[in-house]
Image (cartoon, grey):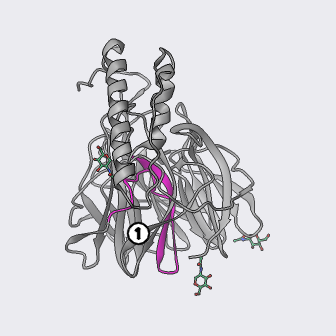
Amino acid sequence: MATSKPLPPRFAAPLALALLLALALVADFLWASSSSSLRITTLTPSPSKTVKGKRAKDVERVVGHLNATYADLPAPRWDWEEMPAAPVPRLDGAAVQIGDLLYVFAGYGSLDHVHSHVDVYNFTSNTWTERFDMPKEMAHSHLGMVSDGRYIYAVSGQYGPQCRASINRNFVFDTETKEWNELPPLPLPRYAPATQLWRGRLHVMGGGKEDRHEPGLEHWSLAVKDGKALENEWRAEVPIPRGGPHRACVVANDKLFVIGGQEGDFMAKPGSPIFKCVRRHEVVYGDVYMLDDGAKWKQVSPMPKPDSHIEFAWVVINHSIVIVGGTTEKHPITKKMILVGEVFRFDLETLTWSVIGRMPFRIKTALAGYWEGWLYFTSGQRDRGPDNPGPKKVVGSMWRTRLHL
Ligand SMILES: *[C@@H]1O[C@H](CO)[C@@H](O)[C@H](O)[C@H]1NC(C)=O
Ligand SMILES: *[C@@H]1O[C@H](CO)[C@@H](O)[C@H](O)[C@H]1NC(C)=O
Ligand SMILES: *[C@@H]1O[C@H](CO)[C@@H](O)[C@H](O)[C@H]1NC(C)=O
């Protein structure tokens, strides 16, 4: 597959500068003409900043001054408390909460190392209390996962480090007996598919296809009860209008919601023996799809900005879905990935969104939980700093804040 080559530097620098000036003009215009509450800071390039070597910095500085799709949205600052960090840093892991326990699965420790175990955090004692292994055959990242309060269903995902392919095997863990079992395989492998339990069936939809990149639209379900499949095969359901990985999938008020996500992702470099990840074209979106009758997907209000990498970054509280962090559309000039640091609320009565708070930093694939008035998140990949929303360190840190909706 052809990748678009970056411009040679002698063209890229003047072009970037021209774009900066154009953006400055647009920003000035918006600043002057808009009476909305959106904070738009004007960019005033001074001649000294055009000195060679400083341009890259200026381009990065622009990130904070772009339109709402790329910039941080205005949001109240919240006080966050740092709690004990997970035993390992973790990116693209999975998590489910059962009572006061958060089960944190798998994930990359680094691009070349994946975890094959589960760490458990207790929200009452605020300690990491347990660690146990996953089956060797189970995927190590980008799993679909859901729990009924006792059994944890773990669906497909990527097997191995870097950008290896996804698999179609599915497992179930009984949190009481601590036993693992296998469920019938998906008809096809899926990478980070949307997964939920709805009306007695395990639903799996969207995600990326085996190559990680091509969006899957297929939607399947399997009747399950008490950790057992009641059928031998997955049933085809109404396909989701837009495919792709890294979406929040939530059942609330007896409706199935699929929120945000992206089309495309990194994929393995052809012929690379280590399946080295290379960046491919991605489109991040904030679309929200709802299934209430099982027959037709309805599109409802989109998120306040495109948001992906939120598959386990949500909780449902008091008729609201609360989502933390993620990634938004890439920067239009630098093409760099941009992380999200807002906390979003989706009101399940009005089906509308609001931005309710800000995280201590921007972070993708955070794993969220809620217990007795506290909103928690742990793990993921965080930003480079308050002024740079690009991705940097993979962390295991755990944070919490008081939540009042
Ligand atoms: C921001 O800019 C992009 C690219 O020009 C555009 O597609 C998008 O609609 C803009 N978003 C907002 C909120 O103005
Ligand atoms: C979590 O910790 C608290 C306090 O130590 C304990 O009482 C509770 O049983 C623990 N939860 C579970 C599910 O083990
Ligand atoms: C949820 O609603 C209950 C009852 O109104 C309230 O006491 C509680 O504080 C609310 N929780 C949050 C997180 O706002």
Q: Residue at x 37, y 77 (%)?
A: 200
- The percent coordinates of residue 45 (x first, y second) are 45, 29
Residue 281 in percent (x, y) is at 30, 36
The quarter of the rendered structure image containing the N terminus is top left
Whereabouts is ligand 3, in terms of quadrant? bottom right
Residue 321 drawn in magenta: yes
Q: What secondary structure is marked by label 1? A: strand
Q: Closest to the observer: 229 or 367?
A: 367
Residue of label 1: 353
Write the residue at 59% across / 43% down. Answer: 386
Q: Please tell me in which quadrant of the rendered image residue 359 appears.
A: bottom right
Viewer-closest of 197 and 214: 214
User: Quarter holding the C terminus?
Assistant: bottom right
- Seen from the viewer's position, the closer of residues 315 and 142 is 315
Task: Say above or below: 263 vs 235.
Answer: above
Amino acid on which disc 1 is placed: Trp
Give the image quarter of residue 218.
bottom left
344 relative position to 204: left or right:
right
Magenta highlight on residue 400: no
Q: Quadrant of residue 76?
A: bottom right
Percent position (x, y) of residue 264? 31, 42
Q: Quick check: 354 above or below 255?
A: above
**Residue 53 in sight here:** yes
Outermost residue on the front side: it is: 32
Is residue 14 positioned above or below 107 on the image? above
Q: What's the magenta region? A: 302-328
